[in-house]
Amino acid sequence: MITIWEVIMRILIVDDDNSTLEMLKNALEINGYECDAFDDAREALDSYMPYKYDVVLCDYFMPNINGIDLLKNLKAMNDDIVFILYSGSPNQAIIKEAFNFGATDFLNKPMDWSVFIELIQFYECNSDI
């Protein structure tokens, strides 16, 4: 008997706003993705294992460690990670800094859910998972 293993994309979500965190997690899980969610960037960083996740979704404005600091730390462990930063109050300086440090994409909040899922599907189709 031949067994076919389905590889499921794993996504790490980091946002200090619990309602956004739950909405993102639910939207992704409904679409078949495996997600771990943290409301504290330090906890996410402490529990991060290179190559465990295919995509990181992260809010920019968070206490203790902002999204770009988390990006720098995770990229140092795994330069290949797809890192999508988002913010409800973006400005050009933040967006430029995010891309300079290796962000793969930047989204504005509130997000258009259909565009958001299409973006995740794009990275899934163009990854080596």
Image: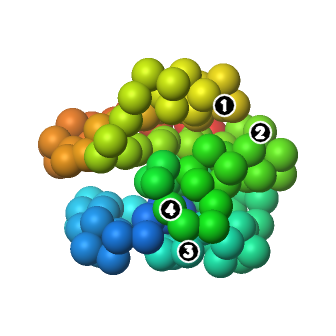
Q: Point out residue 19 in the picture as x, y percentages from the top left corner.
A: 25, 74
Report whether 115 appears left or right of 68: left
Q: Is residue 98 above or below residue 27?
A: above
Q: Residue at x 58, y 32 (%)?
A: 98
| Numbered label attached to residue 40 | 3
| Numbered label attached to residue 79 | 2
Report whether 98 appears left or right of 6: right
Q: Secondary structure at mark 4?
A: loop
- State which tag comes first along the sequence, 1 or 3: 3
- State which tag comes first along the sequence, 3 or 4: 3
The span from disc 1 to disc 3 (Cα, nearest Å) is: 21 Å
The span from disc 2 to disc 4 (Cα, nearest Å) is: 22 Å
Q: Quadrant of the N terminus?
A: bottom right
Classed neighbour count for the residue bearing mark 1: other residues with Cα under 10 Å, few (<14), some (14–19), many (≥20): some
- State which tag comes first along the sequence, 1 or 4: 4
Q: What residue would you read off at disc 4? A: 62
Kind of residue indicated by mark 2: Asp
Q: Does the residue at mark 3 contact the one at mark 4 (Cβ under 8 Å)?
A: yes
- Mark 2 vs mark 1: give the one in front: 1
- State which tag comes first along the sequence, 2 or 3: 3
Kind of residue indicated by mark 4: Met
Q: Secondary structure at mark 2?
A: loop
Kind of residue indicated by mark 1: Gly
The picture quadrant where one finds residue 3 is: bottom right
- Mark 1 vs mark 4: give the one in front: 4
